[in-house]
Every structure is written in structure tokens, then in C-alpha cells.
Image: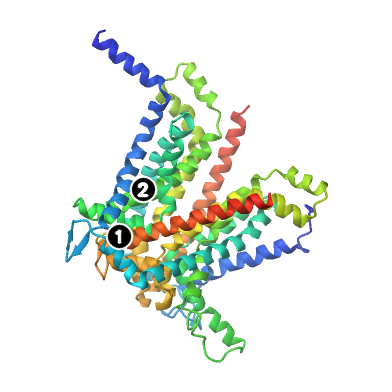
Amino acid sequence: MNTNRPWWRPDGFAVYAMIYLTFIYLPVLFLPLFSFNESKYIAFPLKGFTFKWYEKMFNSPDMLEALMNSIKVGLTVAILSTILGLLAAKAVTRYRLPGRGPVMGFIMVPLVIPAIILAISLLILITQLGIPLSLWTVGFSHMLLCTPFAMLVLISRMEGFDRSLEEAALDLGENAWMTFWRVTFPIVLPGIVASLLLTFTISFDEFVLSFFLTSTDPTLPIYIWSSLRFPTKLPPVLALGASIFVISFFVVAFAEWFRRRGVKTDSTSGL
Amino acid sequence: MSLQSFGSIIRRRFLESEALRGFSLLSPTLLAMVFGLAMPLLILFTLSFWLQDYVDFIKTFSWKNYSDFFAKPIYGMILIKSIKISGLVTLATVLLAYPMAYFIAFRVQKNKLVWLILITVPFWTSYLLRVFAWKVMLGYNGVVNSGLKSIGLISEPLEFLLYNPFAVTITLAHAWAAFAILPIYVSLEKIDRSLLEAARDLGENAFMSFVRVTLPLSMPGVIAASLLVFIPTVGDYVTPSLVGGPSGIMIGNIIQSMFGKAFNWPLGAAISVMSMLTVTAMICLFLWGTHRFRRRIA
């Protein structure tokens, strides 16, 4: 069953894998293609090669402002939800809590509720309290959505490590804070990095919550949404999309390099 | 007993009590969730019994929104259609993802992580642009029409590809693919390989050992994948707005319009509550069904 076939005689599964990859890649690959297309209409036939949409991308202050808003919200959300996730993950992995199951279930609710319902519930609460809509309300809603993800990532990292390391540090006279800083933190660091990346990505791409909870400041997805209705605004958006894609490729490559380094230090510290 | 020693007893109790220390660590997260989740949902529920009066609410208890929901069949019909579309999307996503996850878990020998990253790469594109990509695929001058025209199969572009429930289904199935593969992969990867060898040694053929060992053991992943796809897609309103057309409208569009153009927040709240109840009921039915299925084959 598990024979190593040569690559030129793939089995059925490998053929299926290729078809599947084509299905998930094909539609997405047409977007960067149109970002180099001369015509402003996203339709065939292609008109000719151009860089002008990339030039235009840098000359669209509205779009760049939306991008900056998304980055600001994303960074804030990533940091806050990772802190909340870290505290919660430490609480449920380190202490025997009565009612652990229901508490975890409650924190996970944003994962199993359609975003539109979370969005309108928050909209009702915020307007009833008389709080003005702004990027802060957007950020708060993103934080609710991201915290369960941060918690899941960090729990899986924390369950993996040996608690006696922390106990040893305490026995050797470190206080609780220094134990956290010098023992727990470095071991959990790869989980923290993963959580920051994941929560930033979720916030950066979130549309429905932002759409309901922002006033006049658009995030990037809101800007994209509005430009989908005006076809002529679209090619610079595709150029930006392609650029973001390339940048995220390097970020993921860096994260993977960082993770492998983390694995290496883990194995040596196990000596 | 002096006040000071009383204080120190409390302090010691606190440090000794695991539960207290645990909950104090948990309290910021819980507080955020109570304020940002429990309270809003409660208010949503309350609002569904109020009425809209121009820009204000009539804050007296009323069943009117719910009787409206049942009186006008359009809401129920669209809710059922949304459940059907999402169910179909879930089925398609899980069925397509399972062999892929199986391939990575059992056939790929090294660099599994590279395969997993390869699968998530297309999803780094903005969700909105991924949905839009299907407009490019299925549109009047889109990829499919241009392709078919260039090989001479059709002379005029096909117009039925876009703006219907089918377009919504295929777009959602594409957009949520990664959410199905990862949980199924994790549950397959966890399976102890010696169990499969045991099944083969005891005379089961490859297919039967899959049905009786691999499939039941991977059910937690299949269930997680199904829920991860089903729940968010029921309420999705981006995809139906962009590729659904009038016949592809889903319940998310109705809810959105109640909070937008139609401006009837209480009715919107009641429709949301009904959607949540229906989705919860469907999930219970699904979990009950999979539970029975597992018991039957195991």
C-alpha cells in the first residue's frame, strides 16, 4: 500500500491532487493576470501588457489610506487578541478549572456563529450605548473574532511543553514574573508568532464585521467592496492584491524559517 | 484575629486555590467576551420583540416580528434555500477535500508541510477578490466563455453560468476549501498506522479497512470540517450579492437589507434569531446522524 512510486507513474491520488490544486489555484491566478492587462475592463480578450495599474496604485490616496487603516487595525487586533488568548490559554492549560468546558465553549462561540449575526448584534449594542462607530468599534469586533483563534493556537503550543521547567525556575528562586519572562515566554514564542500572524491575517481580510461597524473610515476590504461596483476602479485594486500576495509569501517563508529555528532550539534545550 | 493576618489568609487562600488563580487569569478574556458577545446576543434577542417606529424603537413586548416572519413565506423560503445551498457547499467541499487530505496524510512521505502551505496559498488573496475571481471565470466575457468560444464549441457566450444558485455554490465551495482540508488532514494524520496494518492482517481488503478503520477514525475531522464550512456560509452575504443575482439571494442579504435599505432592525433581529435556531437545529440533526453512522459501521 505504501510503496514509493516513481513520480512519472503517479497513482490515482496524486492525479486527483493535481486536479484539486488546479481547481483552487486557477480562478485566483487570473487576478494578477488582469493587473498587467492594458484594458480597464476585467474581461477577455487581453489587450496588452502594462505596468500602469501598479503606477496608479501608488497614486490612489483613498486606497492607500484604506490599506493603512487595515494595517493599523490588524496590528492592534493581533496584539490584543494574542494577549487575551495567551492569558486564557495559560488559565485553561495550567489550572484545574471547574466548568472548563462551558467556559471554553463560550469563548469559542464567535467561531460558530455567522459573522453577519455577530455584526448586527454588536451594531445594536454599540448604537444603544451611544458609542460612535469608528475604526475602534471595527477593531473591537475583530478582537472578538480573533481571540478564539489565538487561544486555540496557543493552547496547542502550551499543552506541548513540560511544566517541570517552570517549576524548576520557581524552585531555583525566580519569581512568577521572571519565570514567565525567562522560561515560559521563550518556549511559547513560536505559538505567539503564529497567533500574531493568524490574527493579523483574519483581521486584515475581515469584511462583514467592518462593513457594519465602521462609519466613514474604510478598511481595505470595504474599499475593495466599493470598487467592485465601479469596474474602472478595479485594476489598481488587483495590482494591490497581487502585491499583497507577494509580500505575504515572503512573510510566510520568514515565519516558516523562524519556526524551524524554533524547533531546532527546542531539540537542543531538550538535552 | 487581627485584620492583617486575615488579609494574609485570604492572600494565601487565593494563591492556593487553583480555580481562583485560573479564573483571574481568564477574567480579561471572559470580560471581553461577556461584553462583546453575550450582551449583544441578548440585546439582539430582546430587539426581536420590539418594533420599529421610524428611527426609534417601540420598546414593548410584541410577537409581531415573528408572526411577520411566518406570515410572509418569502423569509422562510429564502432561509430554507440558504440552508440547502450551504448544505450542498458543505457536501461538495468535504467530498472534494477528503481525498486530498488523505493523499497528504498517507501518500506524501516528506515535506507534508509544503503541501499544506501549497493548499493555503490561494487563500491569501482577499476573500472579496476570490469571490470576484468567479465573476471573471463565469462572466459574459469570462474565462469559461472565452475558452469555449476559442475552441469553437459555442458561438455566443453562455449567459446562464453566472447569477444563480449554482454560481453561489461553486464560489463558496472554492472559497472555503482550505477550511475543510486542514481538520480532515489532522484527524487522518493522528490515526495509528498499526491499526490499518492489523485490519489488513486480519484479512480486510484495502477498501473495507478504509471503511471500517480509517473512515470512522477520521469522522471527528469530517464533522469539524462540515461545521466550519456550513455555519459561516449560511449567513454569507458577500457571495450571493456578487455572483448570486436575484435567484441566488440568501438569508444574509435579507438580514443586511433589514439593517440597511429596508430599515427594520427588529424584524432583522427576529430573522437572525430564526436563522440561528434553524442552523442550531440542523447542526444537532447532523451530529445525531453522524453519531448513528459511526455506531453502525464501527
Which amino acid type corresponds to the residue marked 2 in the rendered image?
Answer: Met
**Position of B296 relative to A97 (above/below):** below
A203 left or right of A1 in image: left
Residue that sits furthest to the top in the current view: B1
Residue at x 30%, y 60% (from the top left corner): B269
Q: Nearer the viewer, residue B163 or B214?
A: B214
Query: Mark 1 highlights which residue?
Result: B269
Point out residue B193 in the picture as x, y percentages from the top left corner: 73, 45
Chain of the residue that carries numbered disc 1 in the rendered image = B
Point out residue B48 in the picture as x, y percentages from the top left corner: 28, 58
Among the 4 quarters of the image, the one containing residue B99: bottom right
Query: Mark 2 highlights which residue?
Result: A143
**Position of B241 relative to A193 (above/below):** below
Residue at x 80%, y 55% (from the top left corner): B205
Point out residue A132 in the picture as x, y percentages from the top left corner: 21, 54
Of labels 2 and 1, the one closer to you: 1
Q: Is residue B257 visible?
A: yes
Chain of the residue that carries numbered disc 2 in the rendered image = A
Say which element carries label 2: helix
Q: Is residue A75 visible?
A: no
Q: Nearer the viewer, residue B170 or B132?
A: B170
Residue at x 24%, y 11% (from the top left corner): B3
User: Where does the N terminus of chain B fall, quadrant-wise?
Assistant: top left
A263 left or right of B228 in image: right
Say which element carries label 1: helix
Residue that sits furthest to the bottom in the current view: B155
Which amino acid type corresponds to the residue marked 1 in the rendered image?
Answer: Ala
Q: Are marks 2 and 1 on the same chain?
A: no
**Position of B165 relative to A253 (above/below):** below
